[in-house]
Image (spheres, rainbow, N blue to C red):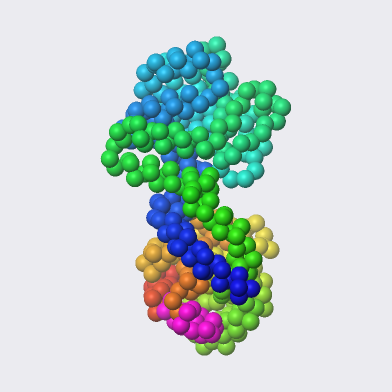
Amino acid sequence: MIENLEKLIVEDSLQLEKIKAYIDQPNYLEILGISHRELQHSNFLAWIFDSKASHNGGSFFLKSFINRLPIDSEEKIKFNLSNLDGTKVLREYKEIDLLIVNENVGFTICIENKIKAGKSGENQLIKNYEIVENTWTALSHKNIYVYLTPTPRSFSKEESDINYVNITYREVLEILEETRTSIDLAEYSIPLVENYIKNIRKNIMADSNEILLAQEIYRKHKKAIDFIVNNKPSLYSKELFDKVNQYFIEHSVYENLTPKDKSIIRILPKSVLSYFAISSNSWNDTNSIFALEIFCEQDKIWMKFCFGKISNHSEERKTQIQKEKNRLFKKMKEFKSLSKYKLTRTKPEYEFPSVANLSIVKITDKINQEINDKFEVFKISFKKIEDGVLNDWVKEVKEKITKHNT
């Protein structure tokens, strides 16, 4: 195995540097964590389809897309010679991902966008067809149905019968590249388009030169790479979990709320226990509606500021507790101590809504290279979280949350 590792390092060290540089390239979709989210991809496509949008590309992308569709040559000529400035691009119209409608020229393009594996929701393509046909009749409109996917997909007989066409992101990529080189786009929009092109290549199509290079290196050094992957550093171990759990069982400042739990550690500073003392039956016998949950994972140890589920109560009692849960949740959302870590999309009505999440220590943190003892790493890192966040959070609990007798 040493021989295999040596070969990998000696033979392909420069190639590995190329791959590292490629991975490290900034990409706004990756930075925002939305590189695979259909909603954001549909939003971008709606923008580039819109001839009046700020990209300054007019109808070039839309007409290029139409030219890829399997429609009659006469219709393509008609659409290409027409002024398409009156085209409307609708998002989530009756749950249709993208709907392109031009009343003057008389066409509708219905697009179901599917980036992730698997088919769209049950009969979604059929539902889209029925919505469009019941709104824009075939007598006045040319209705075109598109299933947009990363790679070619097959259709059911029913979907084929209504002439659904499959367009892939490779074709979208080609149109975007043609748009970028053929049209003087607005200067500010050029980085957006170029970033999007890079994201399709890297995260959707996986066919950049660097990805092909990575695949070639893997084929040459499969044993060595598999060995490295199977032995990559990890923060999680049962031993570490048990030590952290015991640490909070014995801690003078914190109460370990669920000491027998084998997967999640739940704590609260003893000084604020009474502020959350509502018996919601969230976590076994815990007499608290709120907990600081600690998760030990391979890549990181992190903390969740989490409200609990309300269970095993009468409907009347559940309503009372939910009202209190809403109040506490709303108050904590306003805490300055959590402003950097707040989650925006959670709601107090969820079973286990989280106000904020934060990392205690990551596998990539320098401290892991300096100290071998992971429990020691945890204690040092947790102390920083105490000094930087938790102490201020405790003060805000005492100042802004009133005790109650619920």
Residue 42 location (% of width, % of height): 48, 39
* Nearer the observer, 6 or 47: 6
Q: Is residue 147 above or below residue 357?
A: above
Position of the C terminus, as image quadrant, is bottom right
Residue 10 location (% of width, % of height): 51, 69
* Nearer the observer, 60 or 360: 60
Residue 403 location (% of width, % of height): 47, 72
Check residue 379 for magenta coloring.
Answer: yes
Q: Magenta span: helix, strand or loop, mainly?
A: helix
- Which residue is rendered at x = 38% and y = 64% of the image? 339
- Which residue is rendered at x = 65% and y = 57% of the image? 315
> From this viewpoint, is residue 231 visible?
no
Q: Which residues are magenta?
A: 368-386
Identity of the residue furthest to the right in this view:
157
Res 56 quadrant in image: top left
Residue 260 location (% of width, % of height): 67, 78
